[in-house]
Image (spheres, rainbow, N blue to C red):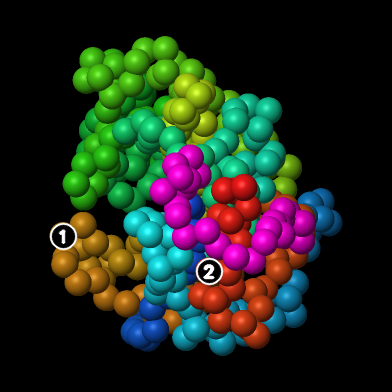
């Protein structure tokens, strides 16, 4: 996927009458990284044993000191040039784009492609490595969170609520005696609804009773969510990783079909651990080696109240660089390919606007 994303070559003139385009919407991926440097606790680096490298060539591909040094150098040199906004609203009036990054877009696209046998997705085309054009869907107001382990640090995470004594969570009955980071006997679904500033756990019965989804739609989506997670776990383990938990979003298209939307199995929406060191870490009461943004959550938790503070501190540059490296590490490990660093000759803003304009022109024909 890193070197073979679909591209469009439409006419260069853009029809400015965009009102007729009512099906595709844009999932724009960009990264806005902070620049301030502050003191922070040291976090563990990702390491792989030589034995594990021999067993899993996918992981060995990314566990190369020289390669990591090259990637980290590129990341640090790029931080000051990252976009805080793309001004795509000038190209597409009333565009409401989501801000993420190239590596997240490509990771999600790889998984979208690999999971089509489980569920159709909303992807229409990929005019730019940072942009996905998707079908406009009526989004279900429920996030389908699937978990395989008792872990997490947020208010709605399984370990947080379990540690407070909750034993019936989102319709799941949990036994006494579980400890943090323990594997569940079976995967569970813990759906949430969106409130103004946080997620709210909800049971399947409540979802139907409140009219958030019909019983038929809920049954179909919950089956797809569990199947997606089980498939993701198998693929991750084949590549030396543990897919710990994730969230899925679904919507219904104009044709009445249910589609997987937003993103899938990215480190933004999922928690990943290194498989070979998990058991040792667990037995010694240590946090598993992770490739997601949990350590960034913990940093903010140590330095502020991310749910109540109006102004949040900027994360340190070193921490931001490490986070970017972990996201690239995950992409390369899962896809067994090198992540293509974005070019710097043309301003990203100009490139994205040009490619999106061309794609829109092609879709209108």
Tag 1 secondary structure: loop
Please state which of residues 290 and 52 is positioned toward the viewer in this rendering.
290
Magenta highlight range:
1-25
Can residue 329 be seen in this snapshot?
Answer: no
| Badge 1 density bin: few <14, some 14–19, many ≥20, Cα 10 Å | few
Disc 2 to disc 1: CB gap under 8 Å: no
Quarter of the image holding residue 161? top left
Q: Position of residue 224 (x, y in %)?
A: 53, 25
- Residue that mark 1 sits on: 308
- Residue that mark 2 sits on: 353
Q: Position of residue 115 (x, y in %)?
A: 65, 35
Quarter of the image holding residue 165? top left
Q: Main secondary structure of the magenta part?
A: loop
Image point (73%, 76%), residue name: 67
| Image label count | 2
Q: Position of residue 86 (x, y in %)?
A: 44, 71
Q: Which numbered disc, 2 or 1, marks the residue closer to the eye?
A: 2
Q: Quadrant of the N terminus?
A: bottom right
Image point (69%, 81%), residue name: 70
Image point (38%, 47%), residue name: 152
64, above or below 10, in the image: below
Can residue 55 be seen in this snapshot?
Answer: yes
Q: Position of residue 35 (x, y in %)?
A: 39, 84
Quarter of the image holding residue 192? top left
């Amino acid at each position: 996927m890193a070197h073979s994303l679909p591209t469009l070559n439409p006419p260069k003139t853009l029809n400015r009458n965009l009102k007729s385009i009512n099906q595709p919407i844009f999932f724009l991926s960009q990264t806005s990284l902070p620049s301030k440097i502050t003191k922070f606790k040291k976090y563990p680096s990702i390491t792989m044993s030589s034995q594990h490298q021999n067993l899993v060539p996918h992981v060995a591909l990314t566990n190369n000191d020289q390669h990591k040094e090259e990637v980290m150098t590129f990341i640090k040199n790029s931080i000051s040039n990252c976009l805080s906004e793309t001004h795509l609203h000038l190209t597409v009036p009333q565009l409401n784009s989501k801000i993420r990054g190239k590596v997240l877009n490509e990771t999600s696209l790889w998984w979208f492609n690999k999971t089509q046998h489980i569920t159709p997705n909303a992807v229409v085309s990929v005019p730019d490595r940072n942009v996905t054009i998707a079908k406009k869907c009526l989004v279900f107001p429920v996030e389908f969170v699937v978990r395989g382990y008792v872990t997490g640090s947020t208010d709605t995470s399984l370990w947080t609520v379990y540690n407070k004594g909750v034993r019936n969570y989102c319709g799941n009955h949990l036994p006494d005696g579980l400890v943090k980071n323990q594997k569940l006997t079976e995967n569970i679904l813990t759906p949430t609804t969106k409130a103004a500033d946080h997620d709210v756990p909800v049971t399947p019965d409540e979802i139907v009773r409140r009219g958030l989804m019909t019983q038929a739609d809920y049954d179909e989506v919950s089956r797809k969510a569990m199947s997606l997670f089980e498939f993701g776990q198998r693929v991750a383990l084949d590549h030396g990783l543990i897919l710990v938990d994730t969230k899925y979003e679904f919507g219904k298209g104009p044709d009445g079909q249910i589609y997987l939307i937003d993103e899938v199995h990215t480190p933004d929406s999922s928690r990943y651990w290194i498989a070979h060191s998990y058991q040792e870490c667990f037995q010694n009461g240590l946090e598993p080696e992770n490739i997601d943004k949990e350590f960034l959550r913990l940093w903010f938790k140590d330095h502020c109240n991310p749910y109540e503070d109006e102004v949040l501190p900027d994360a340190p540059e070193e921490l931001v660089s490490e986070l970017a490296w972990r996201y690239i590490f995950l992409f390369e490990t899962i896809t067994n390919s090198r992540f293509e660093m974005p070019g710097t000759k043309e301003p990203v803003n100009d490139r994205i606007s040009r490619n999106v304009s061309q794609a829109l022109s092609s879709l209108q024909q």
